């Protein structure tokens, strides 16, 4: 399918994708596929005002009825899964299977949110005063700004938006400047759901096209009580304090530096498959990509050669083609970052296998690379950094406590796992003295989370939680209610105040 046909299949018209200043390139061959008009900070302020108006109406719609809109949206996504999945691949370069998987994740969170729309529950609490009832109510918060990264152009937005919408909050979406077409296509799908729904207020979903400046306009506005921002730790450092300064609520989903401990009792075949998928999937450009492999010294010399052999067979190429497992990096900057990291790793004592550009003749304007395995003498500076590329650092350990210490000795705290069939080891890894990450798995890799659990991480990953479990509470305000149905006015703590 030609690039232009993928845009057309997603309802993106010639007029919509030309005539602007924001050039969008596909990482597949580097070609420019759109030149979008961008919004200004002034436009963003107008959008926020529209969102505030939408909120006034939407918050009064019963939550299960709000869920009906998300149900309709999920249905439209099912119908458009193939088209949108292809656009995800075209715009961010992940293989089609993963592009389709991302859309499936959107559908899954819609299903989850529909059920949840009938379960926005609060507690009833025991009052110390006779004739009093105490309970918690959850109310809509207001406009929710959602800032997203290039590597997951649609799913993390959906984790936020599906919940925000059933919670009564309109959404303003600022997608990555590298992947705005996926957002515009999603908006079209959402509009179909809106048309079927009938009486939703205008402005429930608005998309801001542009670079950091328009993101900043959203972040700085007092009329946007929730900012959910996914991206680099550098971005989170800028956004977090600005939201805090105005006492807004920030949900930060930032960088990861995820590890796997492979214990002597591990099922080696399973571990190998999990390592390869989580280290090279999405060309190492997942926040949950496996970046550090901490292997017991008894099995290290057995595992590493097998891993290198598996890497040799990886099909690298056009991510839209059948059978390809490794697509391109997003752009030349990402390639330069990978090269620099490998140079530093070598200088810090690393032995590199793989890496380097491939398919440069076929795709002179794109950046395909061989995924790299780097055996490190210890966890040096470069290993502690998140390089957003397929580099897997291998290290040895002797005692589990040492492996956990190495594991936790990085600034990030997103995802983690252990491969072990020893219950003592695996439970230790999940315990208070184990992994310090927001996600900790046993016998599966660190990437590829399901939507049912809360997603997010600690330390420089930002502390936010999205998607499943009770993450919905992040999009509502909690109110404690005390109702006196007696004929007296007793004060709490037995205080006497007679007049
Ligand atoms: P990025 O930080 O460069 O950009 C992310 C988004 O933030 C973009 O939309 C960008 O325009 C916007 N932005 C940047 N600075 C801003 C500012 N000062 N104010 C407002 N908006 C601003 O990240 P990227 O290169 O697109 O994505 C890769 C990074 O995202 C990696 O670090 C990866 O780990 C992380 N990521 C994290 C998660 C997660 O859930 N934890 C998920 C996906 C990606």
Image (spheres, helix red, strand yellow):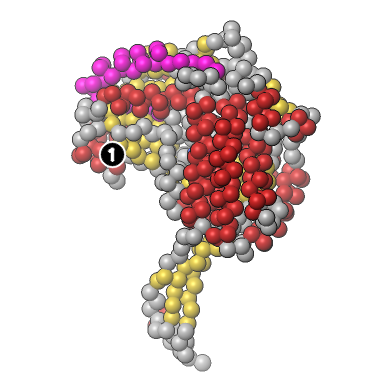
Q: Residue at x 48, y 54 (%)?
A: 115
> For residue 174, which quarter of the picture?
top right
Q: Which residue is mark 1?
A: 429
Q: Residue at x 61, y 62 (%)?
A: 61
**237 is higher (above) or lower (below) than 60:** above
Left or right: residue 356 versus residue 217 is left
**494 is higher (above) or lower (below) than 389:** below
Q: Residue furthest bottom?
A: 499
> For residue 211, which quarter of the picture?
top right
> For residue 4, which quarter of the picture?
top right
Q: Quadrant of ligand 1?
A: top right
Mark 1: which secondary structure? helix
In the picture, which quadrant includes the N terminus?
top right
Residue 144 or residue 201, whichever sits in front: 201
On whether residue 187 falls in the magenta region, the answer is no
Q: Residue at x 54, y 60 (%)?
A: 64
Left or right: residue 271 versus residue 39 is left
Residue 296 or residue 196, whichever sits in front: 196
Left or right: residue 58 versus residue 166 is right
Q: How many marks?
A: 1
- Mark 1, Cα crowd under 10 Å, few <14 / some 14-19 / many 20+, is many
Residue 137 in percent (x, y) is at 50, 67
Q: Is residue 67 visible?
A: yes
Residue 479 in percent (x, y) is at 51, 67
Q: Is residue 229 visible?
A: no
Residue 27 in percent (x, y) is at 60, 22
Magenta span of residues: 290-318
Q: Residue at x 44, y 85 (%)?
A: 490
**209 is higher (above) or lower (below) than 162:** above
Residue 275 in percent (x, y) is at 36, 25
């Amino acid at each position: 399918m030609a690039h232009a046909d993928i845009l057309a299949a997603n309802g993106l018209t010639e007029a919509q994708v030309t005539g602007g200043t924001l050039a969008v390139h596909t990482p597949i061959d580097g070609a420019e596929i759109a030149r979008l008009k961008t919004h200004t900070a002034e436009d963003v302020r107008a959008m926020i005002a529209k969102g505030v108006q939408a909120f006034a109406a939407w918050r009064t719609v019963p939550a299960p009825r709000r869920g009906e809109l998300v149900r309709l949206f999920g249905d439209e996504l099912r119908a458009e899964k193939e088209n949108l999945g292809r656009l995800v691949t075209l715009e961010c370069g992940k293989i089609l299977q993963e592009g389709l998987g991302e859309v499936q994740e959107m559908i899954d969170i819609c299903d989850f949110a529909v059920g949840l729309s009938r379960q926005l529950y609060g507690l009833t609490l025991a009052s110390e005063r006779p004739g009093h009832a105490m309970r918690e109510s959850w109310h809509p918060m207001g406009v929710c700004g959602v800032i997203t990264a290039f590597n997951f152009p649609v799913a993390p937005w959906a984790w936020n938006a599906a919940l925000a919408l059933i919670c009564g909050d309109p959404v303003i979406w600022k997608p990555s400047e590298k992947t705005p077409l996926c957002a515009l296509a999603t908006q079209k799908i959402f509009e179909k759901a809106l048309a079927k729904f009938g009486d939703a207020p205008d402005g429930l979903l608005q998309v801001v096209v542009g670079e950091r400046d328009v993101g900043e306009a959203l972040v700085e506005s007092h009329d946007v009580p929730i900012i959910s921002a996914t991206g680099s730790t550098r971005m989170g450092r800028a956004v977090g304090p600005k939201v805090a300064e105005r006492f807004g609520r920030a949900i930060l989903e930032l960088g990861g530096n995820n590890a796997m401990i492979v214990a002597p009792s591990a099922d080696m075949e399973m571990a190998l498959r999990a390592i390869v998928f989580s280290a090279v999937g999405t060309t190492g450009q997942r926040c949950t990509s496996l970046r550090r492999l901490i292997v017991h010294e008894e099995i290290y010399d057995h595992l590493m050669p097998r891993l290198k052999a598996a890497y040799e067979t990886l099909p690298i190429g056009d991510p839209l083609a059948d059978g390809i497992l490794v697509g391109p990096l997003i752009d030349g900057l990402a390639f330069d970052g990978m090269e620099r990291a490998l140079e530093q790793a070598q200088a810090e004592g690393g032995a590199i296998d793989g890496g380097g550009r491939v398919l440069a003749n076929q795709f002179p304007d794109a950046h395909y690379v061989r995924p790299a395995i780097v055996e490190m003498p210890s966890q040096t500076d470069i290993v502690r950094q998140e390089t957003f590329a397929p580099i897997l650092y291998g290290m040895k350990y002797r005692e589990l406590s040492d492996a956990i210490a190495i594991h936790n000795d990085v600034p990030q705290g997103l995802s983690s796992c252990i491969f072990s069939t020893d219950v003592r080891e695996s439970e230790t890894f999940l315990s208070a003295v184990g992994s310090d990450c927001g996600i900790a798995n046993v016998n599966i890799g660190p990437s590829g989370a399901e939507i049912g659990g809360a997603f997010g991480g600690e330390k420089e990953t930002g502390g936010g939680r999205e998607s499943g479990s009770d993450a919905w509470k992040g999009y509502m305000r909690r109110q404690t209610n005390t109702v006196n149905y007696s004929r007296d006015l007793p004060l709490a703590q037995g205080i006497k105040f007679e007049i």
